[in-house]
Every structure is written in C-alpha cells, then in structure tokens.
Amino acid sequence: MRDVDFKVVYEGVMNQIKEGAFLTVRAGDALNTMTIGWATIGIAWRKPVMMVMVRSSRHTFRLIEKAADFTVSVPNGDAKKALAFCGTKSGRDLDKFKACGLKTAPGRNVVSPIIQIPGIHIECRIVYKNPIDPAQLTHDYDPLYPDKDYHTLYFGEIQACYEV
Amino acid sequence: MRDVDFKVVYEGVMNQIKEGAFLTVRAGDALNTMTIGWATIGIAWRKPVMMVMVRSSRHTFRLIEKAADFTVSVPNGDAKKALAFCGTKSGRDLDKFKACGLKTAPGRNVVSPIIQIPGIHIECRIVYKNPIDPAQLTHDYDPLYPDKDYHTLYFGEIQACYEV
C-alpha cells in the first residue's frame, strides 16, 4: 500500500472511472457496492474533495443516505465483468460480493470498506449532499432521466488516497 | 493556442487553482473576473464538467446568476499580484481589468471571455447550479461562513480547454 496524491494519479483514475469504478458504502450492518462512471475531484472548502452521484432508484441510495462515508475503488487491472455485474444488478436482490467473488478490506480512515483489488482507493467522509433540483438542470440532460430518478450529489472530503 | 485534454493537464491546473485562478463571467454588458481557489473537475452526465463556487456576497454572483457560461483562466506564469487584487477587490467598486492591466480575449465557444494570459483556459456552459443548503453541509465548515454567505455551486460542461 502506497499513499498517492489525488492530483498525480488523476488522469489514470478518471480514465478508468469513465470505464467504471466501485462505489462502496456501509451503513450499519448493510453493505453494498455499485459501479459508477461519473465523478469529479478537486479542492473545495480548503480540502481535497471527490463528488459522486447516486440515483434515487438505487439500492446504494438507501445506504448512502444513512452513511457517513463512502469509498471509491478504481481498478487498474481487468475488472470488466465485475463492473458490468455491479452496474446492472441490484444489491436488493443478491449479494454482489459473493456473486462476483469480490472481497472487501477495511477502510483505513472510514467505516466503509474498499474493494480488495489492485488499483487506486479513495476514502471519503461525506461533507455535503444535494439532491439534484431538476429545475436547475439543463433540459439537454433530460434523456438521462426518463424515469425522473435524479441523482443526489455526494461530496466527500478525501480521507485517504492510496494504491494497492 | 493548443487544445489539451483536461485530464492530462489536471495536476498543473489544480496546483495553480490552489494558488489562484481567474473566474470570468459576462452577463449582457456586464463583465467581471474574480480569483477562485477551489474547483472540481471530472465527468458527469457523460460530459467533462468543471464545478466552481461563488459566494452570494460576491459581485460576480449577480453576474453569473444571469449568465449562461463562465471561463476559468489558470495562469502558468506569475500572476500573483493580479490574483491577489482580484481576490480582494470588488468589481462593484472598480474595473478590475483596468486596475490590473488584464486584457480579455473572446471565448471560443462561450460568451464569457478569457483572461489573456499564458496558461490553461477552460470554457464552460452552465448546466446545473445549487445554492448550498447549510442544513446539508458539515458543521466542520462553519468557520468558512462567518457571514453565512454560502456559495452557489455552478457546474459547467467544458466546451473548450486549451493552452495559450
């Protein structure tokens, strides 16, 4: 395990997030992971911050609404099958970890675990959230929301960023 | 002028934004620039997106609320004096461009101009905005808001990113 600066690894991280990364959330006894393809990273409130987005229709939404933190695991090897599975199946219906053979490892600084895969892992404490107000969103993005299940934006202060 | 991938130039851009960059907005005949030190960049709604934050107490806030777009000019040389000036003086009271000897150049794809300085320039069309809801913000950040002039978050779809 090696600490890395989010700015230095950003290009690789963002290129992989476009292909898929794991957003993992623990809330009490409940644990789930889902595939994300969008995120922004930078500095806000004088802190390194990562923003992720979760649709209200997602099982992860029920969890993250009760959670204090989340992790993003960005694989650097081939995780296509697990990413495709975790992006289409719901943790409501099955245990994604068992189904995909994914193992978790404890978070270093947060309650949510990481996915135990080679790659970059980003641990975040939720510091702000905003359920998208459709009135403030460009209508150009309407086709992304045929079911009106708008995302909530979760801003996480980065607590750890490391390569495994 | 040379087009650049925001992911490739991110590290330098973010290191400079920490020191200061120019956020420039035109709304009708009104034009202003201010210094920002925070931003996040990434992918959302399948598009490259940059988020900037403007406090409700800022002169730029009146403009950006009426504007369709903004630009961020990230200097790669010494712009400390102008950045300090534009971060502390208000466009309400004086013409910052005259006062700092800053020149603008037309935006390539947006109405707002860029600051004519060597560096990276990012042109953004506003696609979403969110006035911070203090009830959803961690109390750890209260010291940043002694006057309760919370930021509004502006999400801009990147229309152009280039080096001058």
Image: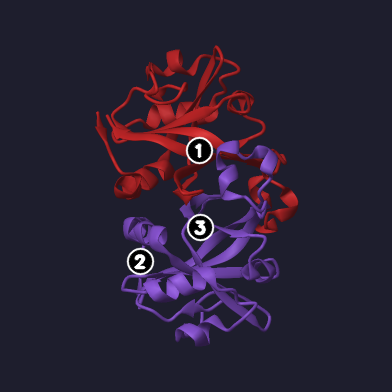
Chain colours: A purple, B red
In the displayed structure, A10 sits above or below A111; it is above
Q: Which residue is mark 3?
A: A50
Which of discs 2 and 3 lies nearer the camera? The answer is 3
Q: Chain of mark 3?
A: A
Rendered-image quadrant of the N terminus of chain B: top left
Mark nearest the camera among 1 and 2 is 1
Tell me the element at label 2. Answer: loop
* Percent x, y of residue B91: 56, 20
As drawn, the label of residue A4 is 2
Which residue occupies 67% across, 58% down? B138
**Rendered location of residue A141, percent (x, y):** 56, 42
Q: Is residue B64 visible?
A: yes
| Residue B141: percent from left, percent from top | 64, 53
Question: On the image, numbered disc 1 is attached to which residue?
Answer: B156
Kindly identify the residue that appears in the image at 44 percent across and 25 percent down.
Answer: B110
Q: Is there CB contact under 8 Å for labels 2 and 3?
A: no
Q: Chain of mark 1?
A: B
Q: Chain of mark 2?
A: A
